[in-house]
Structure formats: C-alpha cells, structure tokens
Image (cartoon, rainbow, N blue to C red):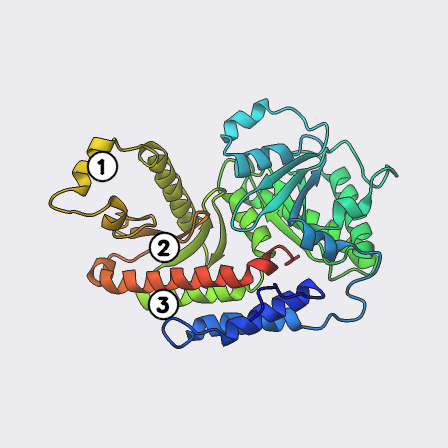
C-alpha cells in the first residue's frame, strides 16, 4: 500500500475517482438507500454529459468564472428605482420604512451572502450605462452572472427604463444568451390590482415586441410585481434563486411526497437568513401560507437570539449532569436540531418547523387532525430531512455552476 496521494490530471478525473470510490465503498446498513442511489446517479449523469458543440465559446469565460467564484445576482435599473432598498430589506434585514433614509448608490456595491448556496449581489448605480462606457469589462460584469435583475419603478415614467432594458437584453442575447433576466416591476404596493396588471401587460408587450423584431422571441425574460412593504419581493427572489439550483425537481418531489404522506397543506424549504424559499411542494402556492411560514421563522429567530446564546455556570452544569441523570448535557438532548410547532387559533392548523442545517429549515402547514398522527409525521419529516441533507451533500459541487 502506498502512502502517496493519487495524482490526477484534472479536477474531472478527481471527481470521477471519488464517485467510483463511493460506489465501491460499503454502506453502514449494508445496502445503499434507493434515494441516495438515485441522487448519485442523477449527479453522475449530469457530470458526465458531453458538452455540446458551441455551448462554450473560447471568448466566453462564463464557465470558468462560475467554477472559480460564486453565482452573481446583478441589480440594475434607473436611479431611485429601489435597487438598494430591495437588497437592504431582503439580505440585510432592514425595516422597509427605514429605506427612506438610504442614499443613492454612487458605485457598485458588492455583497457576499453565506447561505446554503454562497452567492454575490452586485448593486449597480442607475446613472451609469455600462454600454456607453468603454472602460467597463463586460466579461467581468456578465461573465459569471447567474441572473440579471432589472428594477423598474411602476410609479414613475418607465419608458426610458424599458428602452434601456431592451438595449441590455439585446446585447446579452448576442454575447451571454443563457443569463436569466428577471424584471421586477417595483413599488406596486400603492396601486390598484387592475392598474398593476395594466402596467405589467404594457411593459411585457413593449419588451417582447422589441425582442421579436430582432429575432429573440425565446429570450429568458420573466416579470414580477414586487414591493418591499409586503412579501412579494421575497416571493420574487425565491423564483430567481430556484432557477440557480440544479435538480430542483428532486427537492419538489420530496416535499410533495411528504405533503401527500402526512396530509400537509403546504411545505416550504426556507433559507433562514433571507426567508427565501428554495423549494415547495407541487400544490398551488398562495401568498397567505408563505407569509405565515415566513413570519413564523422570524418568531423562532427572535426567540433564539434571546435564549439560544446564554452560557450555563459551572455549578449549574454540574447540577444538571448529576443525579438523577448522571449524563452530560449533550447526551441528554433528544434532538440536536431545532424543531417547534404551534397551532393557529383562527384556523386550527398547526405549523411545524424542522431545522435541516444551519442555513435551511423545513416549514409545513399541517391539518387540524395532524396531532393524531404525530409519531408518523415525525418519522416522515426525519426521513425527508435526511434526504435533503444527502441531496445537498451530493449536488453541492454543482450548485455554484448551475447558471
């Protein structure tokens, strides 16, 4: 047996060797679970899929940038359209009413978010047009981009913003056609429902007509109605992030099977830090259920900040570890991860929260008779949490290159 580490010609050879070793290695139970076997097969197939001719051009550094760095979300739009307010509310927990005191962005603001999927948010000044300034490196801005989020102020004259967006989309389609373009029609909280839909329809038609005239009918452009004063901005960001997650259908299938087995009304997999949900079951999503689950996460976080960081004294610890337990506190904990449950008095529907890891939490709305089946519910939830953990363990190398 040699103690020298194996030498690989490339990272691809290293990953293939790791996969082969994983297949040959014994499993504790003696048999690899069907779920883990399926996830491993999906990952291996996606890894070994040959690159089609023309998909990666020598002048396009997108693949290399994504492998080296993190997925990037670029916020662009006119001045005072609300870009900095969106970033501050979603990723920095700033209260919406405090965004009135934010100064206008004068230079590119770069934030790195440590989450289940590490990514960057670039807030681009609205007064700068990258295509009018030859000093900008387009590859450095758009090369490793996961999604371009263009913010339009719905309460202002948006014709100039739409014109600039059309120029940007046409330029991206020629050089970086795989970038997802998300249009946030923002500040719609003070508008009537009919007026909001009219504005969305008008903006959509103007952009689609321009793209059709230039032969880009199938450009990846999506439109969202957003406001920082309700949960619509979190809903929109959830849709954006979900497009960057590989094998999203596997996560949705897990949650759908959990809801069907346990008779849950709705289940979400939340990123706790931002309250963005990265997956949900196949049932029709409604804003009310998302708001309830999102607010519940806020309650849990607030309680954790109050009670979760205190230290026990040495005397108190000895007293708890003595008679009649005679065991360390770590061994007395039945579940090392956070879990909780409460009942809504108005609808008599329990809400359950189960921690997946330090970044993710599974939140589900149960039915009023769920307490009759709590042992079965707990067993199924535990199985799904284990499946989610295995999913991210297997797909982690590909999450940062999903764009």
**Residue where numbered disc 1 is placed:** 317
Q: CA distance from mark 3 to mark 1?
A: 43 Å
Give the residue at x 53% y 39%: 90
Residue shown at 44%/61% (left/top)?
388
The residue where tag 3 is placed is 260
Q: What's the residue at 56%, 27% (across, down)?
A: 99
Check whether the beta carbons of the residues at disc 2 and disc 1 lie within 8 A of each other.
no
> Is the residue 384 above or below the residue 93 in the image?
below
Q: Which residue is more in the foreground, 376 or 285?
A: 376
Dot placed on the residue nearer the N-terminal end, 3 or 1: 3
Q: Determine the image quadrant of residue 246.
A: bottom right
Residue 349 image offset from top left, x and y in percent:
28, 52
As measured in the structure, the alpha-carbon distance from the residue carrying label 2 to the one carrying label 1 is 35 Å
How would you rate the neighbour count of disc 3 (Cα within 10 Å): few for under 14, some for 14-19, many for 20 or more? few
The residue at the point 32 percent across, 64 percent down is 380
- Judged by depth in the image, the label closer to the viewer, 3 or 1, is 1
Residue identifier under label 2: 364
């Amino acid at each position: 047996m040699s103690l020298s580490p194996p030498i690989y010609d490339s990272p691809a050879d290293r990953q293939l060797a790791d996969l082969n070793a994983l297949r040959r290695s014994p499993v504790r139970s003696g048999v690899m679970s069907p779920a883990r076997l399926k996830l491993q097969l999906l990952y291996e197939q996606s890894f070994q899929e040959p690159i089609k001719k023309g998909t990666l051009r020598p002048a396009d550094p997108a693949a290399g940038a994504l492998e080296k760095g993190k997925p990037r979300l670029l916020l662009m739009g006119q001045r005072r359209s609300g870009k900095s307010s969106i970033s501050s509310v979603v990723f920095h927990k700033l209260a919406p009413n405090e965004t009135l005191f934010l100064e206008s962005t004068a230079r590119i603001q770069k934030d790195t978010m440590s989450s289940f999927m590490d990514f960057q948010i670039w807030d681009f000044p609205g007064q700068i047009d990258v295509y009018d300034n030859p000093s900008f490196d387009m590859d450095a801005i758009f090369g490793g981009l996961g999604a371009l989020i263009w913010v339009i102020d719905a309460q202002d004259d948006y014709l100039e913003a739409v014109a600039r967006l059309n120029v940007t989309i046409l330029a991206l389609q020629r050089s970086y056609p795989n970038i997802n373009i998300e249009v946030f029609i923002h500040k719609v909280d003070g508008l009537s429902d009919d007026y909001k839909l009219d504005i969305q329809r008008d903006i959509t038609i103007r952009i689609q007509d321009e793209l059709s005239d230039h032969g880009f009918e199938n450009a990846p452009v999506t439109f969202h109605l957003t406001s920082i004063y309700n949960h619509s901005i979190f809903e929109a960001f959830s849709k954006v992030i979900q497009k960057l997650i590989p094998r999203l259908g596997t996560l949705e299938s897990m949650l759908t099977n959990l809801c069907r087995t346990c008779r849950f009304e709705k289940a979400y997999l939340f990123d706790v830090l931002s309250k963005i949900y990265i997956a949900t079951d196949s049932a029709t999503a409604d804003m009310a259920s998302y708001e309830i689950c999102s607010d519940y996460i806020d309650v849990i976080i607030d309680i954790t900040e109050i009670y979760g960081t205190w230290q026990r004294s040495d005397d108190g610890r000895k007293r708890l570890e003595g008679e009649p337990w005679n065991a360390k506190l770590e061994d007395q904990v039945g579940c090392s991860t956070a879990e909780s449950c409460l009942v809504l008095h108005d609808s008599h529907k329990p809400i359950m929260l189960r921690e997946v890891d330090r970044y993710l939490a599974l939140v589900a709305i149960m039915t009023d008779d769920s307490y009759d089946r709590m042992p079965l519910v707990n067993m199924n939830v535990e199985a799904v949490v284990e499946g989610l953990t295995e999913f991210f363990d297997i797909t982690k190398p590909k999450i940062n290159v999903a764009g």
